[in-house]
Amino acid sequence: MRKTYPKDFKVQICQHNLKGQKTVGEISKEYGIARPIVSRWLAEYKRYGNNAFAGKGNRLPEAARIYVLEKENEQLKEELTILKKFQEFAKNQKR
């Protein structure tokens, strides 16, 4: 099972790094967390601040908006394809 960490722990780790107290490598060794994970936390924290680490599959506000727009775009493309097919079918029926 995958290990999860609470938001406050991730924030604390990020603040240690951002204040220059510890490097990513030091944090990784001290807490037994893979370097790429610590780096990902840092990137998310730098980008989203207190909105970072939404947790349990919850998307970040910007990511959620993009996800909704992508899904809507897919649906509209499908509807357009169906309408084009119907239009072609209707043309052929008039002949």
Image (cartoon, helix red, strand yellow):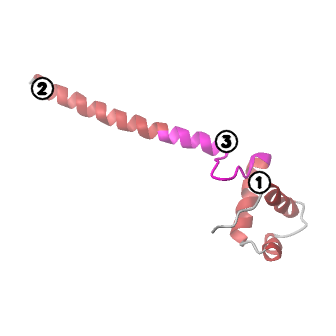
| Residue 57 falls inside the magenta stretch | yes
Q: Is 20 positioned to the left or the right of 54 in the image?
A: right
Q: Amino acid at mark 2?
A: Gln
Write down the quadrant of residue 62 in the picture: top right
- At horizontal 62% and vertical 45% (from top left) the residue drawn is 63
| Relative to 32, residue 93 above or below | above
Name the residue: 73% across, 64% down: 39
Query: In which image quadrant can residue 14 be found?
Result: bottom right
What numbered label is drawn on residue 45? 1
Residue 84: x %, y % from top left: 27, 32
Q: Residues within 10 Å of mark 1 (few under 14, many from 20)?
A: some
Earlier residue among tags 1 and 2: 1
| Amino acid type at mark 3 | Pro
- Front residue of 30/39: it is 30
Determine the CA span between mark 1 and mark 3: 14 Å
Residue at 71% in and 49% down = 54
